[in-house]
Image: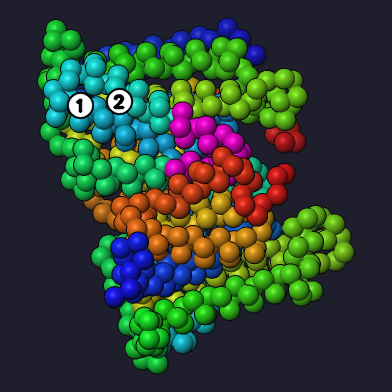
Amino acid sequence: MAGSSNIRARVAVYAVLGILALTAPLLGIYPVFLMKLLCYAMFACAFNLLLGYTKMLSFGHAAYFGSSAYITGWLVSVHGWGTIEGILAGVAASMLLGIAIGAIAVRRQGIYFAMITLALAQLVFFICLQAEFTGGENGLQSIPRGSIFGLIGLGRDDTMYYFVLAVFMAVYVFVRRIVGSPFGHVLQAIRENEPRAVSLGYKVARYKLLAFVLSASISGLAGSLKALTLGFATLSDVNQGTSGEVILMTLLGGSGTFLGPVVGAGVVVTLQEYLSDHVGAWVSVIIGAIFVVCVMVFRRGFVGEIAWRFAHSRFGTRRTAE
Amino acid sequence: MTTVLGVPLPAILGQLTLGLVNGSFYALLSLGLAVIFGLLGIVNFAHGAFYMLGAFAAYIGLQAFGVNYWFALILAPLAVGLLGVLIERLFLRHLYRLDPLYGLLLTFGVALIAEGVMRDRFGASGKSYPVPESLQGAFDLGFMVLPIYRAWVVAASLAVCGMTWFLIERTRLGATLRAATENARLVQAFGINVPLLVMGTYGGGVALAALAGVLAAPVVQVSPLMGSSLVIVVFAVVVIGGMGSIIGAIISGLSLGIVEGLTKVIYPEASNIVVFIIMAVVLMWRPAGLFGREQ
């Protein structure tokens, strides 16, 4: 299917995006906003690995994002850990959490999986609410960004931006690599037809658990970076609202496409940034309405829709019986 | 004073009745979820929002129109049930052919909209709804004091659960409903209007949630967010009980309410997570839930 012009178009898109990303701070866009966007984009890419490529709808991904934010924030600010060590510890924590929750959740499929991940994430939320180290209702404030092994200080917004951008790009390439690997193909086989994957002899539960743990770990990485970037970790990072947002980002941008979650994160974060000052409680109404529209008429998402139109105009199969 | 494990008996009994009250709400809500899931194959995430709307309908009715509790008990579920019917017609109907996950996502969006609108109108703080005069006061049972309203909530919920069970398991309408759950196309071929049945079922399930909301209004604070964390507990209850079974929903709802109440006495810190822990344990032991069938 991948014609040469298709590849050329893709290269062009990535080149433009890459140049934009590298020059964005020079163009006068507020770097903290960009970093926040990148963190959520990373989070959505991790989520997409599950929803888009394995069709597992986790309704509790905030648990990994938020707990990693707490762990990193706590180690860096209270215990004086270095930035990199703090991030790694946060990722390790979310990975362990992913193993524990994933091992239980992959026992059921579809909507049960969604409900179980939601319930266990609520358990994590209550633990964060009551634990000492999270600062309860106040959360952790003024988390220092520190430096990379004492060599490069991250206090300045532009340095921090390039650090976050580098991590984001590495994660993006990593996710693409996973999806393209034999492991990723098994995941997509599970997405298309789970009973058949079982009958072909794949240990489906094991594949799903591995995908879940990978996704949880990357979500944790995103959470850690978000905590360092903005300097705080609060209960809203770990509550169900955040779990809902990451679903929306993935859905809106196009689940099962590489760029979709990034686009979706861009739209949602931008919306929140501008809406929260103007409309108050209506943010949640607008987010809810976007959910409804997405599910009713826009199930492919932005990137999915573009890709679909592109493919169908080219091969003349537009409007055939679906 | 009599004590059990170092805790005074009246405290235990008090928490036990509170647990039963909560368990009644869990039972009503998980019953509605189970009925909707059975026929529509959709997990209704908006269930908590409909519960909240039921409570608000009673509150608004009283404040703006002077509708008393007893009328609210009938009118609020009707109004919210109609809203449910509308949502089924406008949105859910178009999703039945798709993956059930879309239904979950759609109702999640509906819940966000409902909560946002109510928060904009009424703020996030809780409103109190008075206990109706005829249900004020308490029975003195000798070993404990039982507030009449709590006893009423438990009795009313059990009665409604029982009636729903009877309707579904023992009447002709219920038989049709169960048949449509098994094979909708075949039932349609017998000349039964299945889409209407589906619409009515969704409306009925939603009305049950709203009824729970009205019953809850005098015992909890009426607030836009009262349903959003409750619905997650109810999901856990449903996973524990097993989605298919009506009796399972009722029994596990009530018993988990009691367990939660007792945890509040023995180890208060764990009281809001005990249901989730039980869920995890049940899943490891019986993935299909206590009353569920393995597909």
Residue at 15% x, 37% y: name it.
A141
Q: Which chain carries label 2?
A: A
**Coloring applied to the structure:** rainbow
Under circle 1, the secondary element is: helix
* Number of the label disc, if any, that sits on residue A90: 2
Where are the magenta residues, as a range?
A99-120
Q: Quick one: label 1 or label 2, which is nearer the N terminus?
A: 1
Vertically, is A49 above or below A151? Answer: below
Quadrant of the rendering where the C terminus of chain A is positioned: top right
Q: Distance between the residues labelled 1 and 2?
A: 9 Å
Under circle 2, the secondary element is: helix
Residue B187, image x, y percentages: 83, 61
Residue at 30% x, 25% y: name it.
A90
Q: Residues within 10 Å of mark 1 (few under 14, many from 20)?
A: many
Residue A33, image x, y percentages: 23, 30
Quadrant of the rendering where the N terminus of chain A is positioned: top right
CB-based contact (under 8 Å), mark 1 and mark 2: yes
Q: Is A197 on the left or on the right of B10, as rendered? A: right
Residue A198, image x, y percentages: 71, 25
* Number of the label disc, if any, that sits on residue B135: none
Q: Is A189 on the left or on the right of A298, as rendered? A: right
* Number of the label disc, if any, that sits on residue A75: 1
Q: Residues within 10 Å of mark 2 (few under 14, many from 20)?
A: many
In reply to whether residue A100 is colored magenta, the answer given is yes
Residue type highlighted by circle 1: Leu
Depth order, front residue of B114/B51: B51
Residue B3, image x, y percentages: 33, 69
Q: Is A217 on the left or on the right of A88, as rendered? A: right
